[in-house]
Image: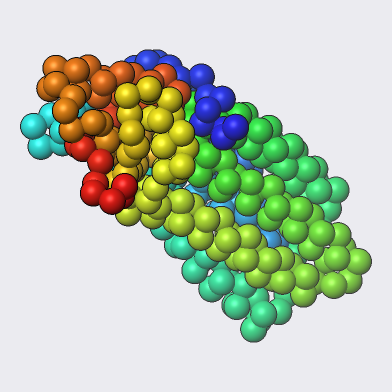
Amino acid sequence: MADTDRTTFLTHDSRYREVRRVLFYVLLLNLGVALAKIAFGQLSGSISILSDGFHSLTDGASNVVGLVGLRLANRPPDANHPYGHRKFETLAAAAIALFLLVIVVEIAQVALLRFRSGGAPSVTALSFTVMFVTLAINLAVVRFERRAGRRLSSELLLADARQTQSDVLTSIAVIAALAGSANGYPILDPLAAVVIIGFIGYAGFTIARDAAKILSDAIVISEDEIRQVVQRVPTVLGCHHIRSRGSADHVFLDLHVWLDGATPLTKAHAVSHQVKDLLMERYPQIADAIIHIEPPPKGGG
């Protein structure tokens, strides 16, 4: 069973408050981690710690973008947005990918400068303490945000959790670079920055890919799964032209259902409601389903 089937679906307002609360807590933690890394990176001259700090600062910036996007996404449908404003949340997730692209460019420039000019960072016991403490915080944030994202079926929280997970990987790379620098290999410091670029780039790609699927109206629920549910209604002869779009927890569905051509209009209308109710019971993430009633095509479709 898919993760969306296991999701506890909350009311619109409850979900909004929950996602906002999670993002706010994560924002505070990310800012604390970022400031600690940036300050110590500046003091120690470690380009890897400094780069990792700016990466964490970008996490905090993306949290702010997410909170703004979430506020817009919570607006109810209106005359200009009859389907609601949920895609603003997806746009916020896409903005996270753009923030990652910016930080990749920044880190690449700093690393290139170190390769050209040389130099070595000052590595002390405090260097490792700062990195291990912030690593532990990042691990806790990833677990907390990912669990909340799955429970609330929020692509924004899941995207942000993937970004924070890249922080975990980069912190490990930085710790390895610090160990190498302490043992006479200062070149590992800018090399760690290159590794960070790879981690951040991959995270940005996956976030952009998932956001693009939603914004381009990629299929959300497979046709075969929908067909199996629809054909449980005894009077239904079949269905086709099944289309679904939206995000994991906010799906719009439309399909054509075949009934006997002699079926009275009132009965056909009742069957369409029966089909719709059955679908929305099976998939609570369906926000609306449009059922078109028609006779089966000649030749059996």
Q: Is residue 52 left or right of residue 272?
A: right
Whether residue 58 is situated above or below residue 89 in the rendered picture = below
Query: The N terminus is located in which quarter?
Result: top right
x then y, percent, for residue 36: 63, 43
Asked whether 205 or 272 is in front, the reply is: 272
Total tally of numbered discs in the picture: 0
Residue 39: tell me if it is visible: no
Asked whether 134 or 114 is in front, the reply is: 134
x then y, percent, for residue 115: 67, 80
Residue under the point 60% across and 65% down:
197
Name, please, the residue furthest toward the bottom. Answer: 116
Q: Is residue 174 left or right of residue 290?
A: right
Residue under the point 62% across and 40% down:
33
Within the image, what quadrant is residue 75 found in? top left
Q: Is residue 146 left or right of residue 70?
A: right
Q: Is residue 87 left or right of residue 199?
A: left
Asked whether 77 or 63 is in front, the reply is: 77
Name, please, the residue furthest toward the right. Answer: 183
Within the image, what quadrant is residue 253 found in? top left
Residue under the point 76% across and 53% down:
172
x then y, percent, for residue 181: 83, 66
Residue under the point 42% across and 36% down:
226
x then y, percent, for residue 97: 45, 55
Residue 189: tell me if it is visible: yes
Here the colouring is rainbow
Within the image, what quadrant is residue 237 found in? top left
